[in-house]
Image: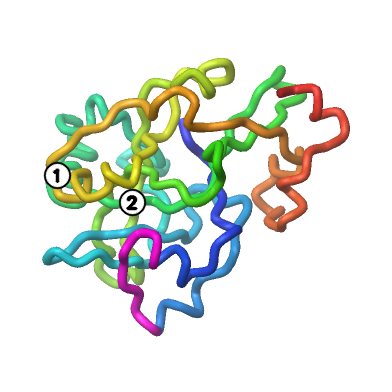
Amino acid sequence: MCGRISLGESSVADVAAFFGARIEPDHVPLYRPRYNIAPSQRHWIVQRELGERRLVPATWGFPSTTGRFLVNGRIESARSRPAFREAFARRRCIVPADGFYEWTGPARDRRPLRFTRREGGLIALAGVYEPAEEGGRYPRFVVLTTAANEEVAPVHDRMPVVLTEDEIEPWLAGEFTPGPVADGTLVASPVSRRLNSVENDDPSLLKPDPDQLRLV
C-alpha cells in the first residue's frame, strides 16, 4: 500500500535534471514543495514519449466502476488486471518522491513513519498512467506496489516499487518488471501525527512528535 508521499526537498529543476526529463515552461509555476501528497491530488509523473522523458503534472488515482479511486496496483498482477493491463503495457511512468509514509500502532492511535533513501535524495516510484480524459487537464496515475522489503515489513506487507537509477529506463521502455528494492536501501523515521490529516502540508510534518522518537 502507498497512500501518501512527499516531494518537498528539491526544486522542479532538480527533479527534472535528476530524471533527465523536459518540463514545459507553462508547467513550472505549478510546482511547489509538498510534504503530504494524497490520492485525488495533483502531483507529477515522468513519462517517456517518442524516446523523450517529460515531467508533467498528473492526478493521483484511476476512477473505477465502484466510484472509488484506484490509487495502487499490484505489480504482480498489473499485466493481466483489466484496470491496469493496457497502461502497464503502453504507459509506464515514474512517480517522483523523496519519501513515502506508512502507519503503525493501534487504530485509535495510528502513527506515521516516513521511509526515505538511506543516503537521502529523490526516489523513483514505478507507476502507470492514463491520458487526460476528454475535457480534463491532466493524466491520471497509480503507484505500483510489491512485497515489502526488510525495512517496510514490520509495519506493512506491501510497499511501493522503488526503482534504482539503472532500472528507470528499462522500466519506462517496458523491458523490465522489478520486485522489492534491496534490503538496506531505505530508512524509517517517525514524523508528526499532523500528517494524519490531508489538510496539513508543511515542512513541520517531517519533525516527529516527542513521543514518536521511541518508535524507530
Disc 1 and disc 2 in contact, CB within 8 angstroms: no
Residue occupying the point 71% across, 17% down = 106
Snapshot quadrant of residue 196: top right
> Which residue lies under the disc numbered 1?
174
For numbered disc 2, what is the local secondary structure? strand
x, y (%) of residue 135?
30, 72
Q: As displayed, is residue 10 above or below residue 137?
A: above
Residue occupying the point 39% across, 37% down = 162
Q: Is residue 57 magenta?
A: no
Snapshot quadrant of residue 197: top right
Hey, which residue is sitting farthest front in the picture?
119
Query: Dot 1, how many residues are within 10 Å of its Cα: few (below 14), some (14-19), or many (20+)?
Result: some
x, y (%) of residue 91?
19, 52
For the C terminus, the quadrant is top right
Query: Dot 2, how many residues are within 10 Å of its Cα: few (below 14), some (14-19), or many (20+)?
Result: many
Residue occupying the point 44% across, 21% down = 149
Tell whether 173 sits left or right of 46. Answer: left
Residue occupying the point 71% across, 27% down = 110
In the foreground, 45 or 110:
45
What's the magenta region?
A: 17-25
Q: CA distance from mark 1 to mark 2?
A: 12 Å
Q: Main secondary structure of the magenta part?
A: loop
For numbered disc 1, what is the local secondary structure? loop
In the foreground, 20 or 67:
20
Q: Is residue 67 visible?
A: no
Type of residue at label 2?
Ile
> Which residue lies under the disc numbered 2?
94
Q: Is residue 37 visible?
A: yes
Q: As displayed, is residue 147 above or below residue 145?
A: above
x, y (%) of residue 130?
25, 55
Tell whether 85 sits left or right of 15. Answer: left
- Compare marks 1 and 2 and give the one earlier in the sequence: 2
